[in-house]
Image: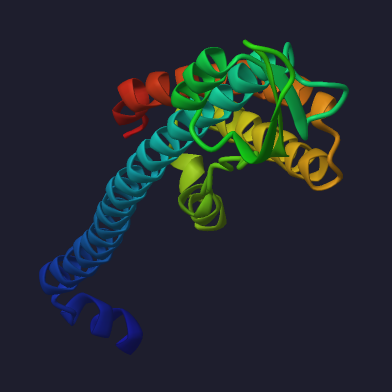
């Protein structure tokens, strides 16, 4: 009987209010924690997207400059090949044509000596100088994004587009290494073939860069 009297004497109104306050407090804490987490994720996404845009923009400039420079090499070799005498250290042509080529492609062929063959033709001895432009394509922002798991917050289309872009970028880097090896081993014909392949990949990569820059804000 004493137990039941104790229960009856309890202030149930006070107890219920306390329980409700505790329940509300716990839910508010959970809500605030979720809100704060979401806020931090959105902030991190903003930072990551800004970094990615900067990286892609810089890579776009790099690849465009490198492609233009390397295609000059292909054009120069194509024209000089017509007047090479068996190798790339001797050419036979007239001074007017040689001067026009030299003006169009400065320093591509460096003359050491010349011998007159007839009234209009000279044999020029020297060396062909080829300087490849290898774009420095970064993927620091992309690797950082993946390591932070921010990619989980991107929509599928955006993530697929980014993955495809950086995979193509790796292919371009691989073929740049092949071009550098061919030049180092003096395989000029092979180098020209590689540069033509690289041009096609460069153009595709440039297009992907432009498309990504136009749509990357939709990743938010």
Query: Measured along the vertical axis of the image, is residue 62 above or below residue 217?
Result: below
Q: Is residue 33 left or right of residue 208?
A: left
Query: Measured along the vertical axis of the image, is residue 130 above or below residue 160?
Result: below
**In percent of the image, x 56 and y 40: which residue is there?**
133
Query: Measured along the vertical axis of the image, is residue 179 above or below residue 146?
Result: above
Query: Measured along the vertical axis of the image, is residue 92 above or below residue 34?
Result: above
- The percent position of residue 146, horizontal first and vertical second, equals 55, 50
- The percent position of residue 10, horizontal first and vertical second, equals 18, 79
Check the image and name the residue furthest to the front. Answer: 119
Is residue 37 or residue 16 the one in the foreground?
37
- The percent position of residue 163, horizontal first and vertical second, equals 59, 32
Q: Is residue 51 left or right of residue 12?
A: right
**In percent of the image, x 56 and y 20: which residue is there?**
98
- The percent position of residue 111, horizontal first and vertical second, equals 63, 39
**In percent of the image, x 35 and y 49: which residue is there?**
51
**In percent of the image, x 18 and y 73: which residue is there?**
15
Quadrant assignment, res 213? top left
């Amino acid at each position: 009987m004493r137990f039941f009297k104790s229960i009856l004497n309890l202030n149930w109104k006070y107890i219920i209010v306390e329980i409700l306050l505790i329940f509300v407090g716990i839910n508010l804490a959970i809500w605030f924690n979720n809100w704060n987490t979401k806020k931090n994720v959105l902030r991190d996404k903003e930072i990551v997207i800004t970094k990615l845009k900067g990286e892609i923009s810089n890579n776009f400039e790099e690849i465009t400059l490198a492609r233009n420079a390397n295609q000059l090499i292909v054009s120069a070799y194509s024209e000089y090949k017509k007047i090479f005498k068996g190798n790339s250290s001797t050419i036979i042509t007239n001074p007017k044509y040689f001067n026009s080529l030299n003006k169009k492609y400065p320093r591509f062929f460096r003359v050491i000596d010349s011998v007159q063959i007839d009234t209009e033709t000279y044999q020029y001895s020297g060396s062909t100088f080829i300087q490849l432009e290898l774009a420095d394509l970064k993927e620091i922002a992309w690797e950082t994004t993946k390591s932070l798991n921010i990619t989980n917050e991107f929509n599928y289309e955006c993530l697929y587009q980014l993955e495809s872009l950086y995979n193509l970028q790796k292919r371009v880097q691989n073929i740049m290494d092949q071009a550098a090896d061919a030049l180092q081993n003096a395989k000029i014909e092979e180098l020209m073939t590689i540069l033509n392949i690289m041009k096609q990949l460069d153009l595709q990569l440039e297009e992907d860069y432009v498309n990504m820059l136009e749509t990357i804000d939709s990743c938010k």
